[in-house]
Amino acid sequence: MTEEKIQKTQPQENKMGVMPVNKLLISMSLPIMISMLVQAMYNIVDSVFVGRLSEAALTAVSMAFPIQSLMIAFGTGTAVGINAYLSRNLGERNFAQADAAAINGIFLAFLSYIAFAVFGLFGSRFFFASQIQDEVIVRYGTDYLTICTMVSIGLFMQMTLERILQSTGKTIYTMITQGTGAIINIIFDPIMIFGLFGFPRMEVAGAAAATVLGQCVAAVMALIFNLKKNDELHFRFRKFRPSGYIIRQIYKVGIPSIIMQAVVSLMTLLMNGILLMFSSTAVSVFGVYFKLQSFVFMPVFGLNNGMIPIVAYNFGARKKKRIIDTIKLSVVIAVGIMAVGFAVFQIFPEALIRMFNNSPDMISMGVPALRRISLCFVFAGAAIVISSVFQALGNGFYSLLISLIRQIFVIVPVAYLFAVSIGLDAVWFAFPIAEIVSAALCVVLLIRTYRKQLKNIPDSAPESV
């Protein structure tokens, strides 16, 4: 089919350009927020079951987090670039280029999988042995990480194909795929870890196997939904040739996003090193915090996933008021979610820790850790939304700068300084300090972005249908 024929068959303007903003943001974000809550729940369940094996098993899974986070950084960063470029082309009604962006994005996801599979095969044991001498933790961690990387095709394809659905407003399908993958993980976690119903007892490796099984099923479902339900895109895999131009456009936003999220991996790795100055239990506490905070942060990330295509589409369509209204509403919702999370962490820290491990050391370290780190939540909510606005408008460098300052130039040095001068309890204050700094920087850069990119856009488009 020629480009001219494709454009003639397109429906009227996408809902992202005409539906009332409050209704649009909720309809775009709520399914993703729900599915991400389910994902956060299976992340927690994963560690809860592993924690029932031993504290060494929980430490091993916590130490594997930097590599898992790095995989998510590459997958999500590439998907963010696809999302922004694809949505912008839809807003400009350049449908042929949007189709090409989707196909090239799938190709990039496959390349990412190959890279991490090679690392998993040859580097998993070295990664753990270089950090800790406990052979039990090294063995558990190697088993876990090898499976997660070698079968990460599901992770990369799931993230890419779901973002393509989000780019065209088909968020209900991402809720189905993510929810299904999470439910499969939750069901098979105890079965594979403890060897129930005739399955062999795989222990920590079982947690990894359940995770990749859920990801692969979700990826297949997302592919089917794109082929069958995504009418605004036409997938042509036959005679595909990578486009250097499109890949550059994707990574113009994607690479800063990858680096921005990859610094989380680096920060976690460095923090683990600082915490090992005290004990492996401190690393377990940090790992538990990351699992628990995902239950608070995931809905905000879901909100962002709904917001980014709206902002990108309306920037392409030159509709300033819709962009500003979307940003304002997103910040209010994000701060509200984070305020609830802050209250829970302040009131119930001991109960949260006991879900994973009842040891006295875990409780004594974990309670002050949760209370002190959660002081950052409200500031983080606003900063996360504003950073995503920069990505949607093609300013990925701003998001990168904010992330680098928060994760590397504030958290790690402050944590190390507190560790050597005061003690473990003070280390956790590095997180709220970093979030206050990054939130202030976000506001300054948002004002600059408004003046340069949005202020002079005329907006006479209708606000609703």
Image (spheres, grey):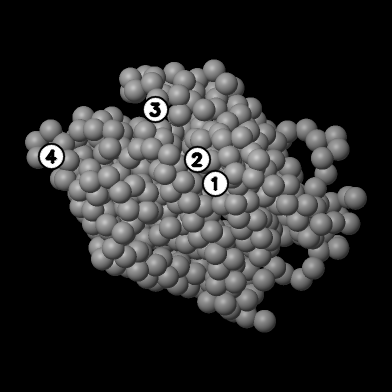
- Element class at badge 3: helix
Indicate the amino acid at tag 4: Gly
State which quadrant residue 195 falls in: top right
Q: Could you tell me if the residues under marks 3 and 4 are in contact, i.e. CB atoms within 8 Å?
A: no
> What residue is pinned by disc 3?
137
Q: Residue at x 34, y 23 (%)?
A: 134
> What residue is pinned by disc 4?
423
Mark 3 against mark 4, which lies toward the viewer?
Answer: 3
For the question of whether residue 116 can be seen, the reply is no
Q: Residue at x 54, y 18 (%)?
A: 122
> What residue is pinned by disc 1?
190
Picture coordinates of residue 202, whole percent (x, y): 56, 34
Indicate the amino acid at tag 1: Pro
Mark 3 against mark 2, which lies toward the viewer?
Answer: 3
Question: How far apart, in angstroms, are the residues tagged by discs 3 and 2?
Answer: 25 Å
Question: How far apart, in angstroms, are the residues tagged by discs 3 and 4?
Answer: 25 Å
Indicate the amino acid at tag 2: Ala
State which quadrant residue 415 falls in: top left
> What residue is pinned by disc 2?
73
Question: How far apart, in angstroms, are the residues tagged by discs 1 and 2?
Answer: 28 Å
Crowd tier of the residue under label 1, counting other residues whose Cα lies within 10 Å: few below 14, some 14–19, many 20 or above = many
Picture coordinates of residue 233, whole percent (x, y): 77, 55
Picture coordinates of residue 82, whole percent (x, y): 62, 47
Question: How far apart, in angstroms, are the residues tagged by discs 4 and 2?
Answer: 31 Å
Question: How far apart, in angstroms, are the residues tagged by discs 1 and 3?
Answer: 20 Å
Side (left or right) of 55 relative to 302: left
